[in-house]
Amino acid sequence: MMLHIPQVLSEAQLAQARGLLARATWADGRITAGHQSARVKANEQLPHESAEARELGQMIVGALQQNALFMSAVLPREVFPPLFNRYGEGMHFGSHVDNALRGIPGTPHRLRTDVSATLFLTDPADYEGGELVVEDTYGEHAVKLPAGDLIVYPASSLHHVRKVTRGARISSFFWIQSLIRDDARRALLFDLDAACIQLTSEVPDSPALPMLTGVYHNLLRQWAEP
């Protein structure tokens, strides 16, 4: 399931993020790429141990925890500490699939990447090109969102970032290990949760509501990997 989640960061948070990013020191983006990805990756990245990356990452994780749409769609078990990249003119990232497992920096722990996420931090008018393109059985889906908006999609997807031809595109990217490993099951639970929320709003006394809510939680109980 591919989903656009608007306004994850507020205008005040975006202003804070831009101030931190303006004074950050960027490195070669291949520092986090696997062997195959490194061959097609041309961008810059904040070192994960930098003060700016840590502060911004904490801000983003806090915002995600307060975002009901993100929580419902992704059902996160664990969020990888957000990383940050910059695509200047001529930079791009060729087609690749994200690694299935990623080590958490500074720990012996590894996270399974069920869901990939990109949080846009640059306004679309400030650059040309730089679209995230996700490929699935329905074709290619080009994504270029307002600053502060998030796109989530299955980490198993083939995807690439088109070459930036003007300006610079800055974003945060990270992965989530979900309580529900299977994307199709996550999509079913998301639709069922949305139906329960709508029914609660429109017909709060409906006798079907407790039944539907029970189905949701019983499926979650059956499928979840806590």
Image (spheres, rainbow, N blue to C red):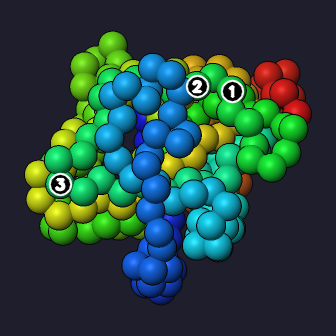
Q: Nearer the viewer, residue 66 or 211?
A: 66
Q: Few, some or many C-alpha atoms within 10 Å of disc 3 (few <14, some 14-19, many ≥20)?
A: some
Q: Secondary structure at mark 1?
A: strand
Q: Are marks 2 and 1 in contact (CB under 8 Å)?
A: yes
Q: Few, some or many C-alpha atoms within 10 Å of disc 1 (few <14, some 14-19, many ≥20)?
A: few
For residue 3, which quarter of the picture? top left
Q: Nearer the viewer, residue 159 or 215?
A: 159
Amino acid type assigned to the residue bearing label 2 in the image? Asn
Residue at horizontal 81 percent and vertical 28 percent from the top? 224
Q: Nearer the viewer, residue 109 or 200?
A: 109
Q: Residue furthest top?
A: 137
For marks 2 and 1, give the CA distance: 6 Å
Q: Quadrant of the C terminus?
A: top right
Q: Secondary structure at mark 3?
A: loop
Question: Dot 3 corresponds to which residue?
Answer: 89
Amino acid type assigned to the residue bearing label 3 in the image? Glu
- Image vertical order of residue 38 relative to residue 29, above or below: above
For marks 2 and 3, give the CA distance: 26 Å
Question: Dot 2 corresponds to which residue?
Answer: 99
Q: Secondary structure at mark 2?
A: loop
Q: Few, some or many C-alpha atoms within 10 Å of disc 2 (few <14, some 14-19, many ≥20)?
A: some
Tell me the mark number nearer the camera, choosing from 1 and 3.
Answer: 3
